[in-house]
Image: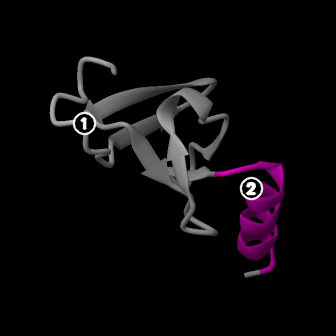
Amino acid sequence: MNRFEKSGMPTEARIRYLDGDYQVESPGTFVRCAVTGTTIPLDELKYWSVELQEPYVDAAASLKRFQETVSR
């Protein structure tokens, strides 16, 4: 259990996505994929968009969002 899991209940974090890193603005244990809605534990977060400020569960979800935004 990390220091933010006092109640043992998972909570959604609010994150500011930066180039190659992210900053936790509101503590939590996970974020939600902007494409699939899947929960992503913070220690497994690897894909996000700085421009759109949203996380992705995997490379496929990231590519899907990229293709959606390019085709607008």
Q: Give the label, 1 or 2, closer to the camera.
A: 1
| Residue occupying the point 45% across, 48% down | 31
The N terminus appears in which quarter of the rendering?
top left
Q: Position of residue 56 (x, y in %)?
A: 64, 52
Q: Earlier in the sequence, mark 1 or mark 2?
A: 1
Q: Secondary structure at mark 1?
A: loop
Q: On residue 8, which mark appears? A: 1
Q: Assess whether residue 61 is covered by the magenta stretch.
A: yes
Q: On residue 38, which mark appears? A: none
The C terminus appears in which quarter of the rendering?
bottom right
Residues packed near mark 1 inside 10 Å, few (<14), some (14 to 19) or many (20 plus): few
Q: Position of residue 45 (x, y in %)?
A: 59, 36
Residue segment shown in magenta:
57-71
Please name the residue that numbered disc 2 is placed on.
62
Q: Assess whether residue 5 is covered by the magenta stretch.
A: no
Residues packed near mark 2 inside 10 Å, few (<14), some (14 to 19) or many (20 plus): many
Q: Nearer the viewer, residue 11 or 50?
A: 11
Marks 1 and 2 sit apart, C-alpha to C-alpha, by: 30 Å
- Give yes or no for contact between labels 1 and 2 (Cβ–Cβ under 8 Å): no
Q: Position of residue 50 (x, y in %)?
A: 57, 43
Picture colour scheme: one colour
- Position of 25 with respect to 7 (left or right) is right
